[in-house]
Image: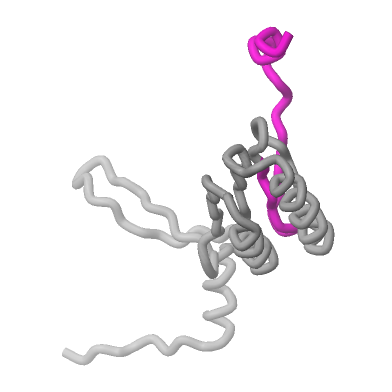
Amino acid sequence: MEETLERVTLVDRIRDFFVREEVEEHDTDHVPTRSRVESNSIRLHATHRYHVTVRSQIVSFQDAVAAADGLKRGEQQLLNLSRCPEDLREKIKDFMCGVNYNAEGSWEEVADNVYLLAPAIAHVEVAPASQRMVAGRN
């Protein structure tokens, strides 16, 4: 018995880029089979994971420099400055504000002396405070 192999052309590769595979189940044998379904959607492949760095104990300016370097690399930073002395806390906040401004990032205070700094590629959505949270502050 002679087998023939199908030759993959450039057109086939381009078509396969825009084709989505779905799994269909048949009632009789309960084994899923794959069939090709044409779609107008485009498959996106992530090149890497999104990186978030949590810095829970910033106690020196060197810790802030490490956070700034991470932000410059495009990594989201969560900074906890609550254990930092007051004068150093203000220096670090000023320094990180400058770095964040240069990176065109987002800055959100998520708790007392806890800040979220996100690079420009990240979308930060701040949900409105619930009635329970508002009542707790009053």
Left or right, 64 with reference to 101: left
Q: Is residue 1 visible?
A: yes
Number of on-image labels:
0
Percent across and percent down for residue 132 are 64, 10
Q: Position of residue 118 (x, y in %)?
A: 69, 52
Residue drawn at point x = 61 percent, y = 62 percent: 62
Residue positioned most to the left: 1
Q: How is the image coloured?
A: one colour
Q: Which residues are magenta?
A: 115-138
Residue at 77 percent of width and 57 percent of height? 95
Question: 21 or 68, which lies in front?
Answer: 68
Q: Is residue 124 magenta?
A: yes
Up-down: is 111 above or below 132? below
Q: Can you see residue 41?
A: no
Q: Nearer the viewer, residue 38 or 113?
A: 113
Residue 18 placement, left or right of 128 = left
Q: Quarter of the image containing the N terminus? A: bottom left
Q: Which residue is found at the position 70% from the left and 21% from the top?
A: 129
Place of residue 52 in the rendered image (x, y in percent of width and height, measured from the top left): 55, 54
